[in-house]
Image (cartoon, rainbow, N blue to C red):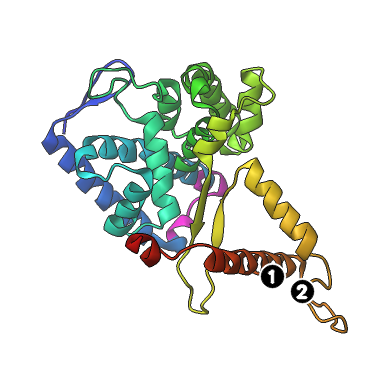
Amino acid sequence: MTLGTTEGHAPQMSADDLRSAVSALVEATAALTGAGSDVWGLLSAEEREDLYGRCQRARNSMVLMDADFLRAHEDALPVSVGRRANYLARAFHLTVPEAKARVDAANRVHDAPVRRDGRPDRRHMPALRDACRDGAVSTDSVAAVHRAIDRLPRTLHARLTEACDAPLADLARSHGPAAFHGLGPRLRALCDIDDPYTDEDRARRRTLSLGKQGFDGMSRLSGLVTPELAAMLRRVLCDLGNSGDLLPDTAVDRRTPGQRYHDALAAALASSYSCLLYTSPSPRDRTRS
């Protein structure tokens, strides 16, 4: 297999070269995972750490393979991020969080700075891609960058992407993935804006999801609520979530704060929904009228 190089270190490969590279990777992985601790024990501590570090850098750089695969496979993928993650999880035996991290990272470090419609891809971060190729950045770190930018107002996305690309790549090389925690405040400082969010931005980010029932019948509730809904929830918790609320006067309240908040929300929903049932026509009645 003969590989050339172009500007930016991108290898020029044929389809046969790619097939050979994947086969070589599978063989090398089988050899590494089959070596066993006894073989690793034959090395000095210094050499063990050196070889393991090289393996980790190679593992980190695989984020580019993920990104380029997803870019090439785009026509076969669902449109939404959530469905793409679910597809990857099912097809390649990943957890959904792992799959979503790959989808998020691919938005930033794929190899095509121009969209298929000819417009420039404002999400593309070439310096970060180079850092990934060097093994300095992992999938989770690139995904964290994407999420931190995406959480800010859309009007800032292109400006932030261009401004923080090179600094983040340098930060990754000098301080490693740990430097990517808590990026949101740093990015806002980069734009010199205390509160860049508008009501439209908050409306765009609002979400609520109720997970499937677990083996014990319980379901996980998660999401991100607007300030208005948060204020209503706090009022419910303040009125009904104190110690002793919703219990008989003589009862001893042994509930945790989380349990009291759960019961307060359940009581408020039950009360409000009951009122709606009595005051609003049913869907069947509305259809008849």
**Residue neighbourhood size for the residue with mark 1, other residues' Cα within 10 Å, grouped as few (<14), some (14–19), many (≥20):** some
Residue range corresponding to the magenta coloring? 39-48
> Relative to 65, does residue 265 appear above or below in the rendering?
below
The percent position of residue 279, horizontal first and vertical second, equals: 55, 64
Say if residue 181 shows up in the picture: yes
Residue 62 position (above or below residue 279): above
**Disc 2, disc 1: CB below 8 Å?**
yes
Q: Quadrant of residue 202?
A: top right
Image position, residue 267 (x, y; %): 67, 69
Q: Is residue 58 visible?
A: no
- Please give the residue where the numbered disc 1 appears in the rendered image: 263
Q: Quadrant of the C terminus?
A: bottom left
Left or right? Give the position of 242 relative to 288. Answer: right
Occupied quadrant, residue 36: bottom left
Real-space Cα distance between discs 2 and 1? 8 Å
Q: Is residue 78 above or below residue 32?
A: above
**Disc number at residue 154?**
none
Horizontal relation, residue 161 to residue 133: left or right = right
Residue position marked by numbered label 2 in the rendering:
246
Residue 287 picture location, percent across and down: 34, 61
Residue shown at 79%/61% (left/top)? 239
Quick check: is 189 in the magenta stretch? no
Amino acid tagged 1: Asp
Please give left or right for residue 69 compared with residue 130 in the image: left
Q: Nearer the viewer, mark 2 or mark 1?
A: 2
Asked if residue 147 is positioned above or below residue 259 in the image, the reply reads: above
Foreground: 35 or 150?
Answer: 150
Question: Helix, strand or loop at disc 1?
Answer: helix
